[in-house]
Amino acid sequence: MTDKDLPPYRKIADELRVRILSGTLHAGEKLKSENELKDQYDTTRVTVRKALALLKAEGLLISEQGRGVFVRPRPNVQMLTTGANFRERRATGVSNFNAEAAAQGLRPEQRILSVETVPAPAEVASRLDVAEGTQVIVRRRAFFVNGEPMQLVDGYYPAALFDGTAVAEPRRIRGGVSRLIEDPEGPIRQRITQFVEDLEIRMPSPVEIDSLKIPPGVPLARVFRTAHTSAGQTVEVLDSRVPCDRHVFRYVIDVP
């Protein structure tokens, strides 16, 4: 289909999309009213409304009741994952998420939603190499940047290994659980030598849409990250749900 064959609402949406993605229309900027856009494009309000609905479904626009339509702010965080920066972050006592967000001039925040002991779900048990239903400690957290929800993260830990440690307590752990695992004077005293990540892209559930404020049409990345130690143990599984419109993941893989 050529540009001439496109319906009018698609042509309007295409033009506005280019202006948004190029930065001509800035994040948070208010669009003209439907009447003003109707006159600008010499069309009807119904056509304008269809164009705006398409861009809202793509996560580029948001409506605010009584205020109008705005370019949706997108506080992207680029997450850089390397062995070197894992060691560097761990040594400072600052988590990788917080350090990466702060380095980009953003304000990170983590909130603990709950800490409990539960039977291991099948997909977690297989990664921890334990029988399904084995008791695990799950730490559920929400991550924010500049007050906006960025991801939900559930961390699973074998209860046999972590019972009685800070992992089982509903409080922040300085430097994160990885620092506790590697602390030579701590309860685990093992060095993490490998992370394995499995990435799944899917549409979010209603709960995820509500918790993460995901606009219509935006998919979600689910990342399972498994931590292995030099002793051959699997000590952590992180189940992260990340809206695809506000993150950039960069993996650096050194090939010998």
Image (cartoon, rainbow, N blue to C red):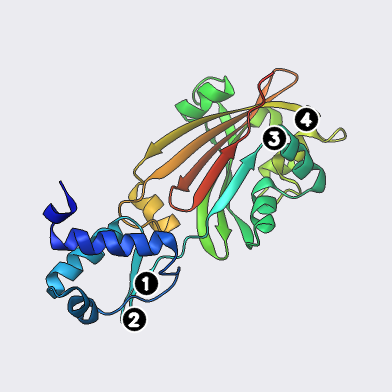
Label 3, label 2: how far apart the Cα atoms are: 51 Å
* Residue 151 pos. (x, y %): 51, 50
Is residue 164 visible in the rendered image? The answer is no
* Residue 61 pos. (x, y %): 34, 65
Circles 1 and 3 in contact, beta carbons < 8 Å? no
Q: Which residue is mark 1?
A: 70
Q: Residues within 10 Å of mark 4 (few under 14, many from 20)?
A: some
Q: Residues within 10 Å of mark 2 (few under 14, many from 20)?
A: few
Label 3, label 4: how far apart the Cα atoms are: 11 Å
Q: Nearer the viewer, mark 1 or mark 3?
A: 1
Q: Residues within 10 Å of mark 3 (few under 14, many from 20)?
A: some
Q: Which residue is mark 4?
A: 188
Decide: is 122 above or below 26: above
For this rendering, which residue is in front, 216 or 82? 82
Label 2, label 1: how far apart the Cα atoms are: 9 Å
Q: Which residue is mark 2?
A: 67
Q: Earlier in the sequence, mark 3 or mark 4?
A: 3
Q: Earlier in the sequence, mark 3 or mark 2?
A: 2
Label 1, label 3: how far apart the Cα atoms are: 49 Å
Looking at the rendered structure, the kind of residue marked 1 is Phe
Secondary structure beneath disc 3?
loop
Looking at the rendered structure, the kind of residue marked 2 is Arg
Image check: 10 left or right of 209? left
Looking at the rendered structure, the kind of residue marked 3 is Asp
Circles 2 and 1 in contact, beta carbons < 8 Å? yes
Label 4, label 1: how far apart the Cα atoms are: 50 Å
Q: Nearer the viewer, mark 3 or mark 4?
A: 4
